[in-house]
Every structure is written in structure tokens, then in C-alpha cells.
Amino acid sequence: MPDFDLLIQLFDKAMTSKTAPHKENNEDHEVRNKKEKFLVLHNDDYHTFDYVIDALITVCEHDMIQAEQCTLLVHYKGKCDVKKGSFSYLRPMKNALIQRELKATID
């Protein structure tokens, strides 16, 4: 059985580590960041781990490990960024998760 605390720490470190952009690309980087959104899955304390994992694999095209990690983060942290992209790219995935009665938002 995996060490969930270590898994969460590694994921948090990966999500918070950022590299500084080159100065000549700073404006392009800022424009891209304004357009990029996150599909956020929220904990609902209702659905099973297997149900959420299957939804992430089907809807977001996660592999098994990524889906399991996101599901654990949702369970222990209350939410998790499960996909990154433009609003128009994320909206169909958000709607598909909502159709599966999961709580998802685009932030």
C-alpha cells in the first residue's frame, strides 16, 4: 500500500515548483497563463474511489496512476487540479464529470 502522505507531499512539490521564464518570453508567458485554466475536481464524500478513478480515466484520459493520485488528493485535500488548458478545451470534460454527478469547476 502506498504511503499517502509521501504521495501528497511529492504532488504538492511538483505543483508548486516553477521555473522562471526567460525575459524575452515573459509577455508571451503572461498571456498564456491568463488563458490557461484548471479543471478542478472537488470532494463530495459520496462517490467511491473506483468510480472517481474510472471517470478520470474516461473523461480526462488519465492513466491509472494519475487517476489514483488525483483521487487521493481530492479525498485528502478536498480538491485537485485534474487538467490544464483553455476554457473551451476543459468545458466538455467539466460537463462530462458533472453528468457523472461529480463536482467539478474551471478555475
Image (cartoon, rainbow, N blue to C red):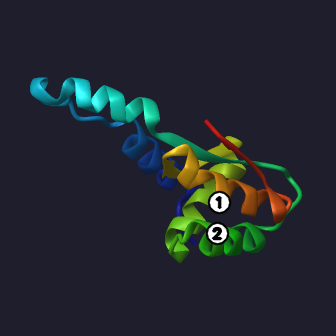
Q: Are marks 1 and 2 in contact (CB under 8 Å)?
A: yes
Residue at position x 54%, y 71% from top?
61
Q: Quadrant of the N terminus?
A: bottom right
Q: Is residue 45 left or right of residue 71?
A: right
Q: Nearer the viewer, residue 85 or 9?
A: 85
- In this rendering, the answer to whether 101 lies above or below 27 is below
Q: Which residue is mark 2?
A: 59
Q: Is residue 82 visible?
A: no
Name the secondary structure under disc 1.
helix
Q: Secondary structure at mark 2?
A: helix
Residues under labels 1 and 2: Cα distance? 6 Å
Q: Is residue 51 left or right of residue 5?
A: right
Q: Nearer the viewer, residue 70 or 24?
A: 24
Residue 105 screen position, x and y as percent? 70, 43
Identify the residue at horizontal 24%, vertical 24% (top origin): 27
- The circle drawn on residue 93 is 1
| Residue at the image point whose x is 58% and y is 52% from the top | 90
Residue 44, x across and y down, in percent: 84, 50
Corner quadrant of residue 26:
top left
Res 2 → quadrant: bottom right
Q: How many marks?
A: 2
Tell which of 100 and 87 is nearer to you. 87
Give x and y (percent) for residue 23. 12, 23
Label 1 neighbourhood size at 10 Å, few (<14), some (14-19), many (20+)?
many
Query: What's the amino acid at mark 1?
Result: Met
Q: Answer left or right for 78 relative to 87.
A: right
Q: Position of residue 51 (x, y in %)?
A: 77, 72
Locate the C terminus by quadrant.
top right
Q: Name which residue type carries label 2.
A: Val
| Residue sticking out furthest to the right | 46
| Residue at 16% in and 30% down | 25
